[in-house]
Amino acid sequence: MLTRLRRSNRLIFILLLLSGVLVIALLLASVFGVVTVPLPDMLKMVLNKVAVFDFLPTWRAVDETIIFLIRLPRVIGSALVGAALATAGVLFQGLLRNPMADPYIIGTSAGAALGATIAMMIPINLAFLGFGLVPVAAFLGALTTVILVYNLARVGGKTPIISMLLAGFVVSALLSAVMAFMMSMSGRFGLDLRSIYSFLMGHISVTSWGQIAIIAPLVVGGIIAAQFFAFRLNAFSLGEEGAAYLGINIERDKILVLALGSLLTAAAVSISGLIGFVGLVVPHAVRLRLGPDHRLLLPASALAGAAFLVIADLLARIVLVPAEIPVGIITAIIGAPFFIYLLRHARREYAF
Amino acid sequence: MVSWQAQRVSFSYLDGLVLNNINLSIEAGEMVGLLGPNGSGKTTLIKLASGVLKPNQGEIELDGSSLRQLSRKSIARSVAVVPQQFNIPFAFTAAEIVMLGRTPFLRAFVEGNEIDKQFVANAFELVSISKLKERRFDELSGGERQKVVLAMALAQQPKLLLLDEPTLHLDITHQVEILELVRRLNVERGLTVMAAIHDLNLAALYFDRLILLKDGRVSADGSPAQVLTEDRIKEVFSASVRVEPHPVTGVPHIVIMPKGSAFQVETNGQD
């Protein structure tokens, strides 16, 4: 009884703590930027907006515009992207039992990048549910690639994990080659190399609340759905056969976890391009600190990933004001040394 | 208590036939050892018995219902498997591993209730490894690991326990401890046991019934005394042995006869 209490208390305590960290990150990222809006003003604006209070404005009208039209959507977008990538990273690492697994491992990144590049060639300005052509194409490119990889790896009703990793690698290489070709011929294709690089290095590009309204349910729903697979992913740690001995329907769960991880990744990529490191490092860092039980690992990684990317995006905006650094560079610069520190000091290392 | 039956079961991997027309029937409460040379189909038969492999032909039945009709989950609620080896990439503790044995009974969002906890604690006590609970699985010795995996299988509350070479790579202490424990569970709790085992002497000591496989067929099936004869061992294993009664228990005891010019063998008048 006591151990049970202690255990669930630990889970609740850790999740509350991480939620607190995320809230602080969200506040910091909302306050600071090219224009700093004092915290009380910012809070009052928000409270006015949700019609709870009616504070007299002590701020400029332009600040309100900045906060509501630019900064808040972006801050919330970066939290969603961070949570989605970290969750997808946990799902793929757990399913594939591979320390190098990240959300992009089975080809989502190459597919999204190629999709985005092709969309950039199309000079028509289409919009779909508040999204331009590029995010839609990136989303579809990521999902199409995973479906292709899964089917290539499928032999005789089974999809061995090693085949999936290899198929993912090969398909990624092929798609990347096509993209490199298009980039090298950018003049002929009418491509703007800068926007491609911006996509490849990662850049939170939320331009409207409409986008948040689509991405948020996808990401939040995906994270909740992931929790259903937590104890099954624990069983997958024994390998596919070991999981089957424990009553797991492995082919069914494999495709579901894969679909879920890919959907989360595709949703993230559509508004952020390819932000590296979050989906690799956050799950590892959380696992090193809290242990490998997916029932805690999944929600903790989602919160930590969100907080991490919110802070990284804040730094990307303010370090070289008014210039903006691609956020993928920030995640790597903070993430790598932090991860090395954890690896050197972790209590629960790996047994790979 | 559960009975198990294979009817005209054949199985082949892509590169060849492994099991050929196997007919076997195991009654509830039996303790059966599967013997045979490497590649004779022991591991495959264990995998077929647990339902993770499906036979190309024939049926495997658990208490009269075909494994094909049963979901993985319902099979796992009565059949547990101890494989040769688990390679676990993450740093789970022994307690977390044994809790995995409760997987077939868990539902999402439920952390494992008191009953699950109780089964885990019981499993640790049965295997006498409660002191290992908080140790990391990957830091345990081979023998300790095998005991943790056995405890995990027992937390599954199996009625049929399948073991694939459970004593492989273990020292003699752990070999005996593992088999003594399985035997005790068989005698005291009526747990039905089928184990692939390569050590003929251990097989003779701990199992009531031995099934000898050769080239994917059943070559002999019976008590240790019926199965482990000098002629049959010579035929199946191409090994030269002498079979004597065990000095204490009287079951067959196999003495390996070295061959080759490197040894000067005293043949006691035989050649």
Image: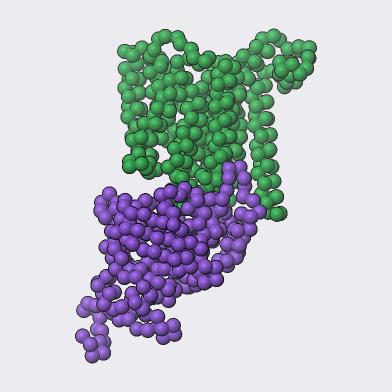
Residue B90 pos. (x, y %):
51, 49
Q: Nearer the viewer, residue B47 or A234?
A: B47
Residue B90 appears in the picture as rendered: no
Residue reaching furthest front? B64
Left or right: residue A242 compared with residue B115: left
Residue A116 pos. (x, y %):
42, 20
- Residue A189, relative to residue B87: is it above or below? above
- Residue A267, relative to residue B211: is it above or below? above
Quadrant position of residue B86: bottom left
Residue B35 pos. (x, y %):
35, 68
Q: Residue at x 60, y 39 (%)?
A: A300
Question: Chain B: what color?
Answer: purple
Question: Chain A: what color?
Answer: green
Numbered-mark total: 0
Residue B81 pos. (x, y %):
46, 58
- Residue B144, relative to residue A134: is it above or below? below
Q: Residue at x 27, y 63 (%)?
A: B215
